Image (cartoon, coloured by chain):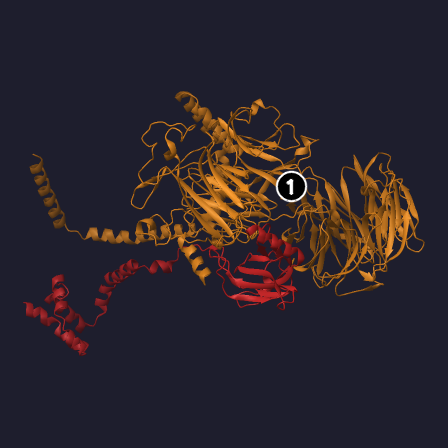
Chain colours: A orange, B red
């Protein structure tokens, strides 16, 4: 009940600023990403046996298991199990459960909705799932209910386990103590094969050891070794250890990819084939069907530097021999193959950059061929790996669809000859994002700058020239006018938000440049639902660099990329994605830093140091060291671009509290882990002086302590530790405001002086020059991982604190009034305080669902949120990045300068028309009245006028 | 003191770990099987919170929960859930036996209140305890647009007044024309006497002289009409 009261109170306090239902999904976008899909764990499958449509399942390289609707590419469900080098996903035939193994977790998901069925964790720390297979048949009989899973464990604990398909309980464990390296498991209807690498002590190659286990007891039945020491040196030399085919295969190659050796698991014979191509083969991939009842045919793909080719092999089950059936011709350029089955038949789909062809495994005749239509998202990219489904009627493929991962990180579905959808999965590891100015704006800004620096006449001529040049767009504009007006009136023709960047009158279209862990760089248009404008691979500019966490910085017209693996920062044109080589061309000042900063600061060896000059140098101006026992965790400075509309805050009685507006404020967070203490220091970055300090005890220092700074206020949040003696538990949000003086209409000791020194703010006049700090703290129901503040053009619009809540996967905008530290405590606000919008202080803030910027979207893994001004004062652009990307725009004081969708243009037109009709009706009435006026009336009127004139002359004379 | 207590707690946690389950019951408010798969519950005490995602049976399983006092929160996209306080302690099953067992207790808790301020008990028991978590309500994300509707326009009293006077202005002559001749004559007579043309002070006087007692006594309408000219004549 109390909660309800609090909820309603919170609702009363702030004007509700929610997303409009008709704006949702139009002004915002969400890229719900999985990450780059892994080839061996990507497949089409029916979510349950009776289902008509199948879903596309995958586990990504960052350990997210998910299902995608193959029709439109929409995410059905996903579950991030956490990053791990080895992630596996298997699906039993005719099951409604999908089993994934990531790290030390084995989880069974309901295939249709992603709910957990059971979960088992490996008991020994440091062990991880190395392989996972479903036991399709046991003694040749299929268990229709729940199929058990066989897992191979590597790491601290090594061995094979059988996990119950219903409960997740471990049925038996075979511990591996021989010192072999576990590699893979493979199941056949009667036995489980466990393949390990047996390395001799004296170096050299490894032997393959195949052990057959009893599915019922897990006991080792038999074990034999294959002499592979000439070829196998690492696990990478093994190409394939066949999954659930009737004839599980084991294939490996040598270092130079010259020989292909294939063994049918369970037999000791090794078939050797030579690579058919004369030029060096870079990679060999073996594609085999993984169905129980499919034909024992497989395809070997040979990739060279210039092209690719393949050979198809047949396995003779009776004689246990492998023979080459036919070969597919070598094609120039990159391509990939995918296997699909229909009943017992096996089909191979070949996908190249411009063509999709389907062949049957029986003969080399092409039974389906489609020419790929180009797509802008896939320009210049080649297929890396694919999975496919083929519909075959009367020995010809009538339809084929393939989920293809392209080299530029796009995961696309190729349906016959069309690209049905593409998902920008490479963006799921975004580490840094910055706003970049659009080219149009930039050129205008540049021209205006030119005009500003010329004399009046020259500037005028320049301006006239500019306007004449603008006229060339006039005919096109005129042509578009009727359609635009019609579209505006009807309001339904397409999305008015996805206009061209050229038609961007409100400044909602802004480019965000993103850098990913893998070294990709992309630019997104936030106003056009996150459309990718360009994307490049940074390795083309720095081939030897291995990017780990590139960071970006925006300058006018270009972005600077820094990474630990780069010797010098890369400069990339922010409008085209091309590299800028000549540094001199771009020596203009950064966009975000208009004024040259004289003192910069950085965290060096646990100390915050201020340097003279624009770059960290040897000239240390000041040093801030945390007290003993404390460690500086982070620092937050006031944004360089932080316009303030008013220097004071007008109180209810029209008096003014003057804000402490120092551009050089830095908030330093320091932690004392043993004492569970967090200290907040407010520094002046020009002088390095300490202006304010506050400490909180009983804080969980292992949890994030985000902070932000804007205008004259800052806020931070922390988690209360369970061991603390504090009265309350949970999470706290603290907001502090800085004023020049505690008294209204008073500017403090510096008020009277005409100039003051920022280098020595408090030394000259003592403590009184330090800001007056008002603080209030609130209990919040959830942990905050990141916080920032909205930005608008002039700073007139009230601000909103934007916090990221990782637990509920949301981003919340808290209105500034709610967290005003001047809320009266323990009493109702007076009328004057009410007129300021202050409500009574309550110790908690419950996040109103209406504050959620993301509404029904679930934004996972957000690393940061950036905000930017738009073209209109009321609106701020918000972009969140991390594993998901989310962009929207917010209007903290309502969209007062833009007509929203609530404005009905048809109604307005109708009203005007109705008024016009009314005038038409009333006009005869008026003329009728005039006609009835007699001559006498006119005469009387004239007399009156004459009299008035006489009086007037009397007065004036 | 606190550190020593926590070390004891950590020692105890190594020795034992409780297992319990949060369950979302089917209520008229929410059918738990429609909750999205991202619904999860967290147990927070120190360090990273323990996390459990919703299972097919609408529950959150927590295994290996060490001794301590936890804040349990259910995070769901569509519904808000009440927070719980869950305490895991080691207690002797039989006094003096020395054999200790985990005991799990759950209460309601309130954001912004003291931790000791516990609400209703939500369950108590040993390992395998099932604690019900109740949804508080649907999350309403969207703001409704206050669009223009002709009906709300008509509800405005000023508009209503204007409409009535409009009706009188335009309707009166029409009514007059359609009146039967007798009534018309009477009306014209009244007009001549100046009833309709009387000034406001007269009407004020009329109100002042209103025979309340007579009206309360239920004098009929017809008689009052007959009387109406009387005060006028009195005045003259």
Give the percent coordinates (x, y) of residue A626: 52, 36
- In the picture, measured across the screen, residue A356 lies left or right of residue A468, that is right
Quarter-of-image position of residue A258 = top right
Q: Nearer the viewer, residue A216 or A73?
A: A216
Going 47% across and 28% down the picture, which residue do you hit?
A: A595
Image coords of residue A447 (percent x, y): 47, 27
- Seen in the image, is A738 located left or right of residue B53? left
Given the current orientation, which residue lies at the most extreme front position? B96
Q: Viewed as shown, does residue B208 lie left or right of A183?
A: left
Residue A742 visible to the viewer: yes
Residue B199 in view of the camera: no
User: Closest to the observer: A507 or B231?
Assistant: A507
Q: Residues within 10 Å of mark 1 (few under 14, many from 20)?
A: many
Give the x, y percent position of residue A823: 38, 49
Residue under label 1, please give it: A377
Indicate the secondary structure of the residue bearing disc 1. Answer: helix
């Amino acid at each position: 009940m109390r909660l309800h009261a609090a909820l309603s109170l919170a609702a009363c306090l702030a004007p509700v600023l929610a997303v409009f239902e008709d704006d949702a999904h139009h002004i915002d976008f969400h890229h719900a990403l999985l990450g780059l899909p892994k080839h061996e764990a990507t497949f089409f499958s029916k979510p349950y046996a009776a289902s008509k449509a199948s879903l596309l399942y995958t586990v990504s390289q960052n350990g997210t298991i998910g299902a995608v609707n193959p029709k439109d590419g929409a995410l059905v469900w996903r579950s991030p199990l956490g990053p791990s080098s080895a992630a596996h996903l298997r699906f039993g035939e005719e099951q409604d459960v999908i089993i994934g193994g990531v790290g030390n977790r084995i989880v069974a998901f309901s295939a249709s909705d992603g709910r957990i069925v059971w979960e088992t964790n490996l008991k020994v720390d440091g062990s991880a799932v190395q392989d996972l297979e479903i036991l399709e048949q046991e003694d040749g009989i299929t268990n229709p209910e729940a199929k058990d899973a066989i897992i191979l464990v590597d790491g601290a604990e090594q061995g094979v386990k059988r996990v119950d398909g219903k409960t997740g309980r471990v049925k038996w464990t075979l511990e591996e103590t021989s010192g072999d390296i576990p590699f893979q498991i493979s199941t056949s209807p009667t036995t489980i094969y466990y393949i390990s690498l047996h390395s001799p002590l004296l170096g050299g190659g490894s032997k393959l050891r195949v052990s057959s286990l009893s599915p019922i007891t897990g006991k080792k039945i038999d074990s034999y070794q294959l002499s592979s020491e000439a070829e196998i040196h690492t696990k990478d030399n093994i190409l394939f250890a066949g999954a659930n085919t009737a004839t599980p295969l084991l294939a490996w190659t040598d270092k130079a990819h010259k020989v292909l050796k294939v063994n049918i698991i369970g037999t000791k014979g090794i078939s050797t084939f030579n690579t058919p191509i004369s030029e060096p083969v870079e990679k060999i991939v073996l594609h085999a069907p993984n169905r129980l009842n499919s034909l024992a045919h497989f395809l070997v793909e040979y990739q060279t530097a210039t092209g690719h080719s393949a050979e198809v092999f047949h396995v003779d089950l009776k004689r246990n021999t492998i023979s080459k059936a036919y070969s597919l011709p070598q094609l120039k350029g990159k391509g990939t193959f995918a296997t699909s089955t229909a009943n017992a038949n096996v089909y191979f789909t070949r996908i190249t950059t411009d063509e999709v062809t389907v062949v049957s495994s029986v003969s080399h005749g092409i039974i389906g061929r489609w020419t790929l239509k180009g797509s802008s998202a896939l320009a210049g990219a080649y297929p890396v790996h694919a999975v496919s489904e083929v519909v075959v009627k009367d020995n010809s493929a009538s339809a084929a669809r393939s989920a293809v991962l392209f080299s530029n990180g796009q995961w696309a579905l190729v349906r016959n000859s069309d690209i049905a959808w593409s998902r920008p999965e490479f963006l799921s590891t975004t580490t840094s994002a910055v706003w970049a100015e659009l080219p149009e704006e930039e050129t205008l800004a540049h021209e205006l700058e030119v005009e500003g620096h010329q004399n009046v006449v020259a500037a005028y001529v320049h301006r006239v020239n500019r306007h004449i040049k603008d006229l060339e767009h006039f005919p096109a504009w005129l042509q578009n006018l009727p359609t635009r007006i019609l579209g505006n009136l009807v309001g339904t023709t397409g999305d008015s938000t996805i206009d061209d960047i050229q038609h961007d009158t409100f400044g909602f279209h802004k480019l965000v440049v993103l850098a990913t862990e893998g070294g990709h760089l992309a630019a997104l248009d936030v106003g056009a639902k996150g459309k990718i404008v360009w994307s490049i691979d940074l390795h083309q500019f720095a081939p030897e660099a291995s990017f780990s966490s590139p960071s970006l910085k925006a300058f006018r017209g270009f972005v600077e990329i820094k990474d630990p693996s780069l010797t010098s920062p890369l400069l990339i044109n922010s409008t085209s994605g091309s590299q800028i080589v000549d540094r001199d061309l771009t020596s203009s000042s950064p966009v975000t830093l208009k004024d040259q900063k004289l003192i910069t600061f950085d965290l060096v060896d646990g100390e915050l140091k201020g340097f003279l000059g624009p770059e960290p140098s040897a000239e240390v101006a000041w040093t801030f060291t945390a007290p003993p026992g404390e460690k500086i965790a982070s620092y937050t400075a006031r944004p360089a671009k932080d316009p303030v509309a008013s220097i004071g805050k007008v109180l209810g009685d029209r008096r003014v509290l003057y804000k402490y507006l120092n551009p050089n404020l830095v908030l330093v967070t320091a932690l004392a882990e043993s004492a569970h203490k967090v200290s907040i220091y407010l520094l002046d970055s020009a002088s390095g002086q300490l202006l304010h300090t506050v400490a909180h005890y009983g804080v969980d220092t292992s949890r994030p302590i985000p902070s932000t700074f804007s205008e004259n206020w800052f806020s931070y949040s922390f988690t209360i530790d369970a061991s603390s003696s504090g009265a309350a538990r949970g999470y706290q949000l603290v907001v502090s405001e800085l004023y020049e003086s505690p008294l209204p209409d008073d500017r403090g000791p510096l008020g009277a002086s005409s100039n003051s020194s920022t280098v020595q703010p408090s030394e000259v006049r003592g403590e009184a020059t330090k800001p007056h700090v008002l603080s209030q703290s609130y209990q919040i129901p959830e942990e905050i991982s990141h916080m920032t503040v909205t930005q608008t053009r002039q700073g007139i619009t009230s601000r909103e604190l934007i916090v990221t809540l990782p637990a509920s996967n949301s981003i919340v905008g808290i209105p500034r009034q709610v967290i005003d530290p001047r809320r009266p405590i323990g009493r109702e606000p007076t009328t004057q305080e009410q007129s300021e919008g202050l409500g009574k202080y309550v110790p908690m803030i419950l996040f109103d669902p209406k504050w959620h910027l993301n509404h029904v979207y679930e934004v996972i893994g957000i690393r940061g949120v950036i905000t930017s001004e738009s073209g209109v004062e009321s609106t701020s652009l918000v972009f969140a990045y991390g594993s998901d990307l989310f962009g929207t725009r917010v209007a903290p004081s309502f969209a007062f300068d833009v007509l929203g969708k609530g404005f009905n243009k048809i109604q307005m037109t109708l009203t005007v028309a109705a008024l016009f009709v009314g005038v038409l009706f009333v006009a005869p009435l008026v003329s009728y009245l005039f006609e009835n006026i007699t001559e006498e009336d006119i005469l009387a009127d004239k007399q009156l006028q004459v009299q008035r004139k006489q009086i007037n002359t009397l007065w004036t004379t | 003191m606190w550190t020593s207590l926590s070390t004891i707690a950590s020692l105890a946690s190594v020795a034992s770990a409780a297992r319990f389950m949060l369950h979302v019951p089917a209520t008229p408010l929410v059918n738990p099987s429609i909750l999205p798969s991202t619904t999860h519950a967290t147990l927070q005490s120190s360090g990273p919170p323990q996390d459990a995602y919703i299972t097919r049976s609408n529950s959150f399983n927590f295994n290996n929960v060490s001794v301590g006092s936890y804040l349990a929160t259910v995070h769901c996209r569509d519904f808000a859930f009440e927070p719980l306080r869950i305490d895991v302690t080691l207690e002797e099953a039989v006094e003096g036996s020395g054999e200790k067992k985990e005991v799990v207790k759950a209460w309601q808790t309130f954001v912004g209140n003291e931790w000791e301020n516990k609400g209703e008990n939500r369950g108590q028991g040993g390992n395998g305890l099932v604690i019900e978590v109740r949804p508080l309500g649907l999350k309403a994300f969207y703001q409704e647009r206050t669009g223009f509707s002709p009906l709300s326009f008509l509800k405005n009293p000023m508009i209503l007044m204007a409409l009535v006077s409009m009706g009188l202005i335009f309707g009166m002559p029409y009514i007059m024309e359609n009146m039967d001749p007798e009534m018309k004559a009477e009306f014209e007579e009244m007009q001549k006497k100046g009833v309709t043309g009387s000034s406001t002070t007269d009407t004020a006087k009329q109100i002042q002289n209103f025979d309340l007692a007579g009206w309360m006594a239920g004098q009929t309408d017809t008689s009052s009409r007959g009387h109406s000219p009387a005060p006028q004549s009195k005045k003259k």
